Image (cartoon, rainbow, N blue to C red):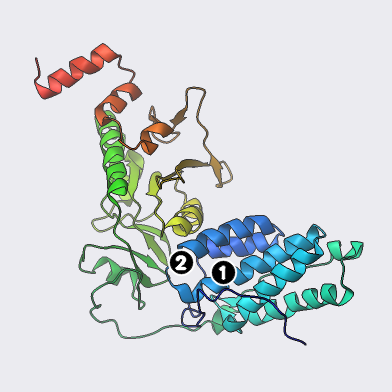
């Protein structure tokens, strides 16, 4: 079969160094979207993951699957030029990652997608029957064919940002010496992330004061920040920016970590965490039963707040603001917040917000402030 002509980006030269890793929950969700024919949705999911990936050598793997899916989207829409341009590019992006990568049978996807490409290309047009043809899917290789990494566990070297440290057990991860960097345990690897921004820390502090005081005053549970480890899945442990754990679930809190789901989790998006927060963690938290998930994106020009709650089937659905632009929690009785509180350049006074949540009027707020400060 002839080579497929396509112009590829040379920004991220590929290697197979990462290919022995297992797919993340976000990636698996994107593959499920692809296989259901939800090609636009898989594009959105994989683009989040691709843009957040710190290892540039694997980005073209994401782009390859993403663009094969977009090529199929063009086929369903009857766009011949889109099929030839985008599908061909996606196939070529995948070739360096064959035969398998991240658990995906890349060789099979290339072969089957190429057959679609040449069927369309040889005719020079799309016919009506082409729009309904059965399209290839993303197949995972059998688990026994995935390379297992086994080695002696010794003291880890100093952790560096962007590094994926060799595989260790969860117990060894908990026992690591705190080196002052954010880490998470994913598929047995310790992943090291960039330090947070000042804005990020200010948001965490604000939420900790408002929600923490509210929860403590009413005896509803506990609010935790400062890199608390939450065991998300059997092979994944995350460090959310903030969690709320209700009184009835306090037994999940151990001396070193949270063994199970928090009731309410907050993640604050940065440039390097978009894919993790919006894809990987979204589906992990949904799967383990985090009842509410709040995603705050404070980045300039991209400010948004997304709030989700589990429905009766265990799937996240958006929680919308009421007519007064208040977002009401369903798991923290009486607690609500305004989106504008979280996206202001200068965050509001935490005590004022707490007083408003509790329904105090302006004069009562002033009296409370005087009592607390001792002002006359």
Kindly indicate the quadrant of the structure image that contains residue 113: bottom right
Q: Position of residue 174 (x, y in %)?
A: 27, 66
Position of 311 relative to 140 (above/below): above
Task: Sort mark 2 into few (<14), some (14-19) or many (20+) by Cα contacts within 10 Å.
Answer: some
Q: Which mark is residue 53?
A: 2
Residue 314 visible to the viewer: yes
Kindly indicate the quadrant of the structure image that contains residue 128: bottom right
Q: Position of residue 276 (x, y in %)?
A: 45, 58
Task: Sort mark 1 into few (<14), some (14-19) or many (20+) by Cα contacts within 10 Å.
Answer: many
For disc 1, the marked residue is 62
Whether the residues at callouts 1 and 2 have beta carbons within 8 Å, the answer is yes
For marks 1 and 2, the one nearer the N-term is 2
User: What is the secondary structure assignment of the residue under circle 2?
Assistant: loop
Position of 2 relative to 231 (above/below): below
In the image as oriented, which residue stretches furthest toward the top? 363
Choose between 347 and 330: the one closer to the eye. Answer: 347
Q: Answer left or right for 282 relative to 228.
A: right
């Amino acid at each position: 079969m002839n080579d497929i002509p396509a112009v590829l980006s040379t920004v991220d030269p590929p290697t197979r160094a990462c290919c022995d890793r297992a797919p993340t929950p976000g990636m698996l969700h994107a593959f499920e979207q692809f296989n259901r024919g939800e090609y636009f949705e898989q594009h959105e999911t994989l683009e989040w993951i691709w843009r957040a990936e710190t290892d540039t050598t694997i980005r073209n793997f994401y782009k390859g699957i993403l663009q094969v899916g977009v090529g199929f989207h063009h086929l369903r829409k009857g766009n011949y030029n889109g099929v030839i341009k985008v599908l061909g590019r996606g196939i070529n992006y995948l070739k360096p990652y064959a035969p398998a990568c991240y658990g995906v049978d890349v060789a099979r996807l290339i072969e089957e997608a190429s057959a679609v490409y040449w069927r369309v290309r040889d005719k020079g047009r799309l016919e009506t029957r082409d729009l309904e043809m059965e399209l290839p899917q993303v197949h995972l290789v059998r688990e026994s064919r995935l390379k297992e990494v086994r080695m002696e566990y010794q003291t880890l070297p100093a952790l560096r940002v962007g590094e994926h440290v060799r595989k260790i057990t969860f117990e060894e991860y908990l026992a690591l010496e705190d080196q002052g960097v954010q880490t998470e345990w994913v598929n047995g690897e310790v992943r090291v992330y960039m330090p947070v921004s000042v804005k990020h820390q200010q948001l965490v502090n604000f939420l900790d004061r408002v929600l923490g005081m509210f929860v403590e005053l009413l005896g509803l549970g506990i609010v935790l920040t400062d890199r608390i480890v939450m065991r998300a899945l059997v092979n994944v442990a995350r460090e959310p920016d903030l969690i709320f754990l209700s009184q009835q679930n306090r037994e999940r809190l151990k001396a070193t970590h949270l063994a199970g789901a928090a009731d309410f989790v907050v993640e604050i998006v940065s440039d390097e965490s978009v894919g993790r927060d919006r894809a990987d963690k979204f589906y992990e938290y949904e799967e383990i039963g985090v009842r509410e998930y709040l995603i705050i994106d404070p980045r300039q020009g991209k400010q948004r707040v997304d709030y989700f709650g589990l429905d009766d089937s265990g799937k996240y659905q958006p929680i919308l603001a009421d007519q007064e632009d208040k977002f009401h929690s369903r798991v923290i009785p009486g607690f609500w917040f305004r989106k504008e509180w979280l996206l202001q350049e200068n965050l509001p006074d935490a005590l004022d917000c707490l007083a408003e949540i509790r329904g105090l009027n302006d004069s009562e707020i002033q009296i409370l402030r005087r009592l607390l400060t001792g002002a006359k």
